[in-house]
Amino acid sequence: MSPPNSLSSDDCRKRKSHKKSRKGCGNCKLRRCDESKPRFDVRLLERFQKSIILTIGTQSSRGIYQRKTLPIAFCHSFVMHTVLSLSYLHLSTSPPPAFAYHYYRAVSLLHRKLSRPVLDSERDALWIAAAFIGVASFANMPDVTRPSEAWPLRAKNASDLDWMKLSHGKKQVWKLTDPMRETGIFRDVAKEVYVHLMAPRASFEDGLGEFGVLERRLPAGFCDLFQLRELLPEENPYWSAAEALTRCWGVQCDPGSKDVVLPCLSFISRLDPRYRNLLEEKDDRAMLLLAYWYTKVCEQRQWWMWRRAVLETRAICELLEERWTGRREASLIEFPKMVAARCAL
């Protein structure tokens, strides 16, 4: 007699037989891909390796990205998801559903990894994944074809300024992964990023003092509008953004040169939290500063920055024209409006 608590063979759940994937990459094994029809298109990876990766970073960092990224992606699924999401974005301004799948998988997996103690073997993968997610978040503008559909004209949306929030989050990833450590695969790139985007800012070297440089380099009327003369930097939420704009204003270099790419990116990396809050509240002056920075982005014509810069500049200018009708400051809208109007989408 069998024990009363034993289960008969009919009650046992049998596992359905299946053919295991014993070849292919780590993702294929994980997803049990049919090796004759892999879930991701190899052509996308070829496009990423030969074209897309060469549009990210500076001339000195692109070669490192090109050599190091795909080997890491084949070992870490969250990096592969970021690579594929960028590739789909690069293909079209209206990316297919596959983009959303890979993008949100990348974000979800990255968040899961960062919520646990970081393994030494994953530090470089986490850092590059966070960097590429930042690029994808800036490039991602689904269903936005005209200014009325773009921030700040559109109705309030949970995704508003996501790219800026993610940029702030990358600083925490930096602390957790320490990409400048001796064994870091991207150590040379991280050093360049730190010097230009994260290290304490050196004073201007032309003898005019901080305010004197801002007054000379910024457009006429900015110092008064943003109270750069009256308020100390620590008292003024606009100061860091105005100072960052000064660093890239009037710089003429070859596209992709670090002399222009990094100063432009420093605007994002050094934003005062008070200024970010003002942008979320659609503060007039904060939006005008952003529109002027976008004009520098437009000059670079980077595929992943171009569309957002053009559409949101047009949207900002439309909103400010409505709010500033008859005001003297309205003349400051003309320059970003002109630059954005010249940019064909």
Image (spheres, rainbow, N blue to C red):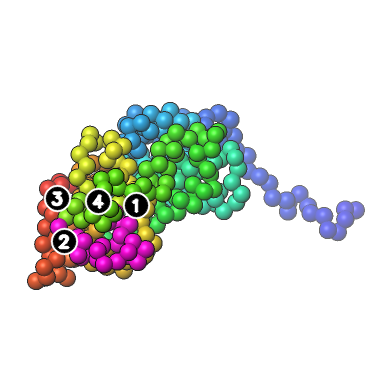
Looking at the image, which residue is at 52% across and 43% down? 178
Name the residue type under label 1.
Answer: Ile
Q: Residue 244 appears at what percent x and percent y?
A: 30, 51
Left or right, 52 with respect to 337, comes to right
Name the residue type under label 4.
Answer: Leu
Q: Which residue is denoted by mark 4 in the rendering?
A: 208
Q: Label for residue 221?
A: 2
Q: Residue 326 appears at what percent x and percent y?
A: 9, 71
Q: Classify mark 2: residues with Cα within 10 Å, few (<14), some (14-19) or many (20+).
A: few
Q: Nearer the viewer, mark 1 or mark 4?
A: 4
Looking at the image, which residue is at 56% across and 40% down? 122
User: In the rendered structure, which disc, 3 or 2, sits on the residue that comes first in sequence?
Assistant: 2
Q: Secondary structure at mark 1?
A: helix
Q: Nearer the viewer, mark 3 or mark 2?
A: 2
Q: Label for residue 268?
A: 1
Marks 1 and 4, how far apart in space?
25 Å
Start and end of the magenta stretch?
220-243
User: In the rendered structure, which disc, 3 or 4, sits on the residue that comes first in sequence?
Assistant: 4
Q: Which residue is denoted by mark 3 in the rendering?
A: 339
Q: Nearer the viewer, mark 1 or mark 3?
A: 1
Marks 1 and 3, how far apart in space?
20 Å
Indicate whether residue 227 is drawn in magenta: yes
Marks 3 and 4, how far apart in space?
30 Å
Q: Residue 261 appears at what percent x and percent y?
A: 29, 41
Q: Nearer the viewer, mark 4 or mark 2?
A: 4
Q: Nearer the viewer, residue 8 or 157?
A: 157
